Image (cartoon, rainbow, N blue to C red):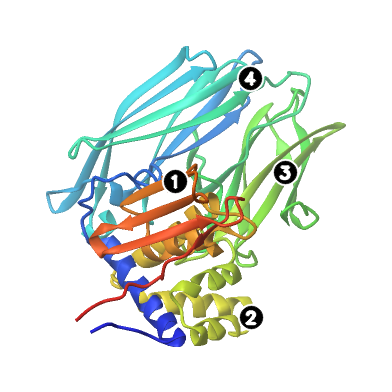
Amino acid sequence: MEWYVSIGGFILIRRVLTIFFLIGVLFAPDRSNAQRLRPERGESPLELAVGRFPTSGTDSIQVNVFTMIPLDKLVFLAHNGEFKSTYELSIFVVDKDETAYGTRIWQEEVVKSQFKETQSEDLYHIAHTSFMLSSGEYRIVANLMDLDSRQIYKANKKFDVTGYPLDQLALSDILLVLKAEDLPGEPDRIIPFIGNKVSDKVDSFFVYLAIRSPIKEPRMASLHCTLGEKDDTSAVLYNKTLALGSPLSTHFIPVATSDLKDQKYILTVKVQVDSLEAEQSLPIQVTLTGFSHLIEDVDQAIEQARYVATNAKLREMRNAGGEEARREAFLAFWRALDPTPETPRNELLNEYYSRVAYANIHFRSLQPGWETDMGMVYVIYGQPDEVERHPFDIDSKPYQIWFYYSRGLRFVFVDVNMLGDYRLITPLYPTRSF
């Protein structure tokens, strides 16, 4: 028989289908070789952080390079009651003409005592190396090869190097650091937050920087640190007088996270020695525990959950009270849908908001991409198996057909106003026979 539903029933069925389709994408193998709307989902998990630090001379700058890889991207083998992974890392520095200025190739060994640690996307292995470079435009190229799986991950980052004149007060780049050890006779051991993102899982972090003074004899320096919301840097975070016993010194500024919200900030550090001043700024992002890294605003994330949450659940999350209460209601909603609640990762939440992020980039028109018809279909069903495009047919307006072969679905979008705003003209749910 034919299956028909009311509008209210359609909304409920659509939300149920969304959950099942998302779970299906997470756990079903992809057997389609058809044309894709986009490449394989996700960027390389290998991330880079680059910090430029002054040296005692003017002809070169020390460039520190940190790489970070999530442990769940490495293959671990049982070894003497523990779990071990080994990978090879190659770092190349090239200038704007692609001339190589430095190469480092070495192996890293990661050993964990518990298997669950090896499956965590929240735990990382960080490796560090450094280069001495003169002024110019450069690019860091990093290649990581897992020596057990032979899987290769790549990352690259552009940066400029500008010299520090000896007659001026110089500040290094700012690094956000999770842990810091300053050992006598040894280089500073630091674990940075790569991507300038700080998790609220930690109680505090450090701002790490180097100061080089042109004044040779010991001096007192005034250090002023502010952390403001977006362009507002009026909030005083840290004031301290430092004793500079040598022309070049490193410093760690502690920052508590208890009063920080899940949003973007501007961190500014100013240093004054006698009449000399120097300043550095850095945008940072505070991220919430349990959230996808793509979520920056909990209220917006609640609205974006409309394709999977009922109206009653949306009202419950919106009206939960203060920001902390709304955040907890949001997380509770997604915890109830977590296909693997025994792990710290919520695959369903991550998949859903990665689709929202993709839709916002590729389908925006007069409204955010996730609210357009194409964005709605993409968030609910994911990437099509095939896209048939008709941009210049004589007897019709531009249209596209999205095929989901494994699910028996087909959606037609028409650019009704000829402005790139494609409207869905087929039902969002299939008519089924039993």
**Visible in this render: residue 120?**
no
Q: Any mark on residue 284, and which?
A: none
**Would you place residue 306 above or below residue 86 in this image?**
below
Q: Report the Cα–Cα distance between label 1 and label 4.
A: 63 Å
As drawn, is 136 to the left or to the right of 391? right
> Mark 1 — residue?
390
Task: Kindly state the secondary structure of the residue where label 3 is placed.
Answer: strand
Which is more toward the observer, 225 or 41? 41
Q: Report the Cα–Cα distance between label 4 and label 3.
A: 21 Å
Task: Kindly state the secondary structure of the residue where label 2 is placed.
Answer: loop
**For mark 4, does the 10 Å Cα neighbourhood hold few (<14), some (14 to 19), or many (20 or more) residues?**
some
Query: Which-is-in-front pick, marks 1 and 3?
Result: 1
Q: Say which label, 2 or 4, has the lower sequence index.
A: 4
As drawn, is 59 to the left or to the right of 310? right
> Mark 4 — residue?
56
As drawn, is 411 to the left or to the right of 169? left
> Mark 3 — residue?
269
Amino acid residing under circle 4:
Ser
Picture coordinates of residue 244, whole percent (x, y): 71, 34
Which is more toward the observer, 34 or 418? 418
Picture coordinates of residue 269, whole percent (x, y): 72, 43
